[in-house]
Image (spheres, grey):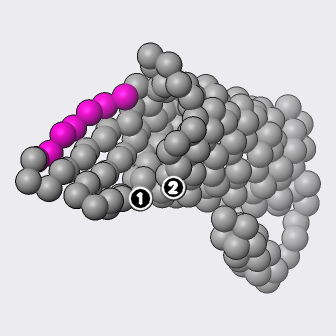
């Protein structure tokens, strides 16, 4: 994961190095999420058939991000998320990952609505289960500018995760999850 983080950060710096750095083009942010989701499990046992199941869960996480404002309507951001998944009926797991998102600001004002679309990579770590997978992110929200440097962000985001499939002897295991979360945070532009 450190290798991917280094590649992404390097790409962001190279991609922006040819752009004249105007005031307040970069921002850092910190925030928190709370949400819920559903794991969909599918297990195929050779000669016995397919067994499907679902598990509901709740999530909370903290998010740290760095972003670049390309113009009034387009931003790109890289975020790191770390949190916990509480499974309905008992049990928990650590859930962490990173995202790269394109933020489309619909119009710039004191209160600016936006849409977001991106991808990410996540790991899930429970007592005896460790999985990793890719995410498709999408959502929308608003940015409220307190002044030229500080903005409050509130959004509702969806995430679809495709966990790596596993094959063990006579078992084929496939796990996917979908989740939605409310995000609230603070961004500082520099």
Front in this rendered view, residue 106 or 89: 89
> Which quadrant holds the N terminus?
bottom right
Query: In the drawing, does residue 67 fall left or right of residue 154?
Result: right
Q: Would you call the spot at circle 2 few (<14 residues within 10 Å), some (14-19), or many (20 or more)?
A: some
> Which quadrant holds the C terminus?
bottom right
Q: Provide the residue span drawn in magenta.
A: 49-55
Q: Dot 2 lies on which element?
A: strand
Disc 2 and disc 1 in contact, CB within 8 angstroms: yes
> Residue 8 magenta-drawn?
no
Q: Which mark is residue 62?
A: none
Residue at 38% x, 36% y is 39
The residue where tag 1 is placed is 164
Front in this rendered view, residue 143 or 53: 53
The residue where tag 2 is placed is 132
Residue at 75% x, 72% y is 6
Query: In the drawing, does residue 98 fall left or right of residue 128?
Result: right
x, y (%) of residue 142?
64, 34
Residue at 87% x, 44% y is 188
> In the rendered image of this protein, does residue 16 appear above or below residue 188?
below
Front in this rendered view, residue 129 or 111: 129
> Residue 53 magenta-drawn?
yes
Query: In the drawing, does residue 52 fall left or right of residue 165?
Result: left
Residue at 31% x, 41% y is 41
Earlier residue among tags 2 and 1: 2
Q: Would you call the spot at circle 1 few (<14 residues within 10 Å), some (14-19), or many (20 or more)?
A: few
x, y (%) of residue 164?
41, 58
> In the rendered image of this protein, does residue 107 appear above or below residue 182?
below
Q: Is residue 175 visible?
A: yes
Displayed quadrant of residue 62: top right
Front in this rendered view, residue 26 or 58: 58
x, y (%) of residue 54?
31, 31
x, y (%) of residue 122?
56, 52
């Amino acid at each position: 994961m450190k290798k991917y983080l280094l590649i992404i950060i390097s790409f962001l710096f190279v991609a922006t190095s040819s752009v004249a750095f105007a005031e307040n083009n970069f921002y850092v942010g910190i925030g928190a999420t709370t949400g819920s989701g559903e794991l969909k499990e599918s297990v195929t046992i050779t000669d016995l058939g397919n067994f499907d199941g679902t598990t509901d869960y709740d999530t909370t996480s903290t998010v740290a991000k760095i972003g670049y404002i390309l113009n009034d309507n387009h931003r790109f951001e890289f975020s790191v998320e770390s949190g916990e998944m509480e499974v309905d009926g008992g049990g928990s797991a650590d859930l962490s990952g990173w995202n790269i998102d394109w933020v489309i600001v619909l119009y710039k004002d004191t209160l600016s609505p936006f849409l977001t679309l991106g991808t990410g990579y996540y790991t899930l770590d429970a007592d005896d289960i460790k999985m990793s997978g890719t995410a498709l992110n999408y959502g929308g929200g608003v940015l409220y500018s307190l002044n030229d440097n500080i903005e409050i962000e509130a959004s509702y985001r969806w995430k679809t995760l495709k966990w790596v499939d596993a094959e063990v002897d006579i078992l084929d295991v496939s796990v996917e999850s979908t989740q939605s979360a409310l995000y609230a945070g603070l961004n500082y532009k520099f």
